[in-house]
Image (cartoon, rainbow, N blue to C red):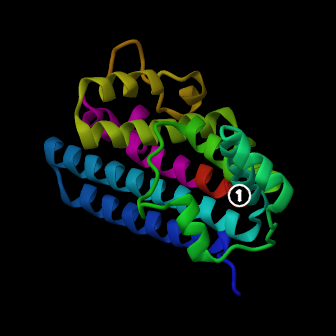
Amino acid sequence: MRKISPDGVWNDFAAQLDEQFAYYQSSWNTLKGADDRKIATENYILTIGVMFEGYVNDLVFAYANRDCSKVMQHLENSLRACLQTVPKAEAAFNKFGDFKQRDHLTKSDLKEILDPEGRNTSFPDFASIEDRANQWLASAHAQKFTNLSAQQRAVINAAIAARNNLAHRSKSSLDRLNVVFNAGALHPTGLKRNVNLIQQAGHYLKARPNNGDSRAIILGRLLRNASEALVH
């Protein structure tokens, strides 16, 4: 049975990012008003943030499909923990039962385990992504996530926070946005905010530090690089 390729997941995501970037640049060049460019920026960041969430879910699934040993171990641990709450059942299982190890789980089996409700997992920050990778993935694959640099983690946190703020427009999401964009690791990138708080994500991200690329383009480029590091 053919397994899902992490490279294939990355290639699909990279193509989508390139498509969105081209559309954003075209929109920017066509639109001249500040408010119009702000809306184009918001749409771009919101879109790539949603796409990144899908990418992470697909990538974890692809890695688990290639090596399901950690998934099997998690299932066994969960079963044994459940049995410990019912001593008679635990005794019966220990005497008559057996946990059969499998070298491969089908895609449908994995879907039932990793995504039983058929919904992508939403991640509030990179730490939660890392936790999920460590929960379900063999160490060689989980290390793709744990080995990211401080700057790559900060970029992913910035993309998630911007996406959430643009989607919800809540005070809490704006507070989180200001915390995340204050990360020291972002300082060399042009994304780190100054002393003043960000009032609107769209205005902040459409601005061009030192008259170069907009912060949205910088964020999109760095998110692309961090996402590729999860595979290559």
Residues in magenta?
Answer: 200-224
Residue furthest bottom in the image: 1
Could you tell whether 175 is left or right of 79 in the image? Answer: left
Of residues 3 and 17, the one nearer the viewer is 3
Is residue 93 rendered to the left or right of residue 215? right
The three-letter amino acid code for the residue at tag 1 is: Val
Nearest the eye: 43 or 60: 60
Q: Residue at x 56, y 34 (%)?
A: 154
Residue found 53% across the figure and 58% down from its top: 57
* Residue 80 visible from this viewpoint: no
Please give the count of numbered marks on the rendered protein: 1
Which residue shows up at 18% across the image and 55% down it? 31
Report the magenta stretch's main SS: helix
Which class describes the residues within 10 Å of circle 1: few (<14), some (14-19), or many (20+)?
many
Quarter holding the N terminus? bottom right
The residue singled out by tag 1 in the image is 71
Seen in the picture, residue 87 relative to 72 is either above or below; the reply is above
Viewer-closest of 145 and 108: 108
